[in-house]
Image: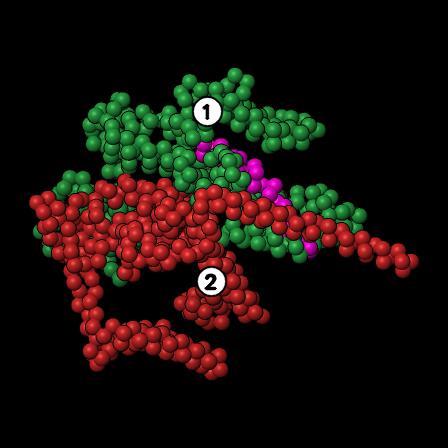
Chain colours: A red, B green
Amino acid sequence: MNLKNFKINLSNKNKGLVPQVLTVLLIILAVVYFTINAQNNMGNRGISFGFGFLSQESSFDIAFSLIDYDGSYSYARAFLVGLLNTILVSVIGIFFATILGVTVGISRLSQNYLISKTAEWYVEIFRNIPLILQIFFWYFAALRALPLTVDSINFYDISFLNVKGWYVPRFIWTNFSFFFYSVIAAIISIFFVSKYAKKQRDEFGKQIPTLYISLGILIGLPFLTFLLGGVTLSFKIPELTQLSKTIYVYQGGVTIIPELISLALALSMYTATFIAENVRAGILGVNKGQKEAAASIGLTKSQILKLVVMPQALRIIIPPTTNQYLNLTKNSSLAAAIAYPDIVLVFAGTALMQTGRAIEIISITMLTYLSLSLSISIFMNWYNKKMAIKEK
Amino acid sequence: MNINLIKPNKENLTNYVSIGGFLVLLGFIDFLANTFFNLNVTGFLPEKLSYFIPIIFGTIGLYLIRIEFSGNRLLDKINTNFNSSNFNAILSLLVIFVLIKFVPPLLNWFIFDADFIGTKKEDCTSGGACWVFVKVWLNRFVYGMYPDAEQWRINAAFLILFFLVGASFFVPVKFKKYFLGFLLFIYPIIGLKLIGGGDFGLKYVETGAWGGLSLTFIVSAFALILCFPIGMFLALGRRSNLPAIKYSSIGFIELWRGVPLITVLFMSAVMFPMFLPDGTYVDKLIRVLIAITLFEAAYMAEVIRGGLQALPKGQYDAAKSLGMGYWRMHFLIILPQALKLVIPGIANTFLALVKDTPLIFVVGLLELAGMVNLAKTNPKWLGMAMEGYVFAGLVFWVICYAMSRYSQNLETKLSTER
């Protein structure tokens, strides 16, 4: 009897072992096969695998860069420029997508028939058109219809919009670091205030108007640096200058290139539809009994929203919305289609053409995105765990 | 007559409604006169005030007619749907005014001022949209660079497909399995052969010439059929007890889900050939199909995994207690239920797939959006970008909207069944 049982166990173990060994062997075989081929191919072309090219001079220009860059910098620097541009457009897109998405999501639940229908049609229209087409539309059709430099659209004489881009004033700071530290100090003190307020609420049942205090600190502290710290801020307004008989440009301000505008527009309008659906689902997902229970213990309407509905709705809203932020960041790679110099265009496009190092460059690009996604999903898992503990 | 302006009430219903209605009407007349006849009725007021007069009049008017349970059905309906508070009243007015302001010019551009007749750009004279452009290029938008004389082959392939799909509803249950097998695994090869040619006296058409809307359908259909089984096995692998299989599945899924499709396509274009023995050439379209399939399979795997997780554990236990092995348990008991649960998710993945197909332009294959891009750079048709993108957007919108509606339909249908 014992022996028989032993046999069964053994066979079960073997059953699991065979497919595992086969899988591992298959993967190893594939990797070896591809590596040998890659080595042969690279040998034929006279290049060897390695990342040494990153420190070589790139000798190409990038149209838009947040840090100092020209052709004399290295490929690694070009990669950094592309990465920063990707992050820039993602952050802008996430900011506007959140605002628009939350507004539309709440509007869809409005009692007002017109508002909810408008929001619904917004979602249906922009969700069902491919993002790349929306980017093309804004870039090639809508923004190309803007006036020429000479007759730009004028916003109160401080910023100008034309077919070459959007010209906004340049901020000129003195003692900027002072101001910067004051903002950080404000954020830290807000953190402590909210912690203190929570303690007061939990222990003594006292309500402290955290929102107003935080707003006060956030505005007041940096404002103090203007009065006491010698921080000044002035604007340099872009001015129309004539370069030659027919060529006019705006100089002095900051230029937001049309590629960035159309990409940010399309990304935020497209992603906002998904965020709107998440917000709607989140608010609808809060049990009606929760609101009634809160009302029955005498909370006011704003207290119900703030203390009962929002915390529960946010728990439903935040995970899929983070996913949308991630999607937006990945979708920003479509920039390559309209020549916005993001990481794909600069690195996997121009740098690859110049160096011919397909394997290294594509791997670096994919690894960059991969590490971005993985870090966000690790954060999400942590957040979900934290929320799940709070439940009990 | 005692009009209490602070609080409209039911006693003086007629007075309130007539005065309120009159004010709203005044606001609308002012707005319409401004918009359509360039007539500023309130021009004698300061500029800013004159600008806001319609809103102010409308809001006051709507305030006056906001009487709860008035007994008048129409009035009650207006009040609950458009006019439940001052804030809602202003929002309603704003939406109506914005619609009045922007819809007629858009319609004019789109239909009333548009040109439909002609064969060249110069025929577009009326200032609206130039649909002549779309008309002239329609053939290219649908078939790409496919030779005109051979286009019947694409038509035939799709017609046979529709016929087979339609026929599948009438096939006896006994043969349905084989019929579906044929449809999913044999027919795609026949269809590709028919469109690609090279044998049976059909002229060979290289894949670079394929394009337009038909390519969108070909790519999405193939990727869907191929990614489904791969995704299924990946999902099973991810839930497997065997660590080697589990972690290789997780690694595979997360790798593809973590990168944008465009980099995957770049990879298939420039990196993949490096991994093949020297001298082997894999067709562009095949490479793209492999890339998209693997990419979508990872997403499909996650969708199916959701279905697997949603099934109660009792189903597994019951199957095991009947003595079923791993594969029989999954194919007879678990997967049929799990897949039914995730039909909406599968539909969403397919929707995302269709919306992703334009990206194949990075390897030089031009489907609908790519063809529009090509057409608008034609020297004879410069400046037609708007028409082209609106047309392509409309086509994609119709396809995707119909599909999302259908998946919502399925969702409600399946949820009532349970």
Please name whichever residue, A176 or B318, is drawn nearer the observer in this view of the structure: A176
The three-letter amino acid code for the residue at tag 2 is Leu
Element type where label 2 sits in the image: helix
Q: Please indicate whether residue A65 sits to the left or right of residue A329 in the image.
A: left
**Which region of the structure is painted magenta?**
B214-242
Residue B105: x, y in percent? 24, 38
- The residue labelled by disc 2 is A314
* Residue B7 in the image: above or below residue B178: below
Asked whether B230 falls inside the magenta stretch, the response is yes
Which chain is home to disc 1? B
Classified by dominant secondary structure, the portion drawn in magenta counts as helix
Q: Is residue A176 left or right of residue A96?
A: left
In the rendered image, residue B367, in percent from the top left (x then y), is placed at: 41, 34
Q: Which residue is mark 1?
A: B205
Tell me what residue is drawn at x 51 percent, y 36 percent.
Answer: B279
Q: Residue flagged by tag 1: what amino acid is it?
A: Val
Asked if B339 appears above or below A88 in the picture, the reply is above
In the depicted structure, whether residue B213 falls above or below residue B309: above
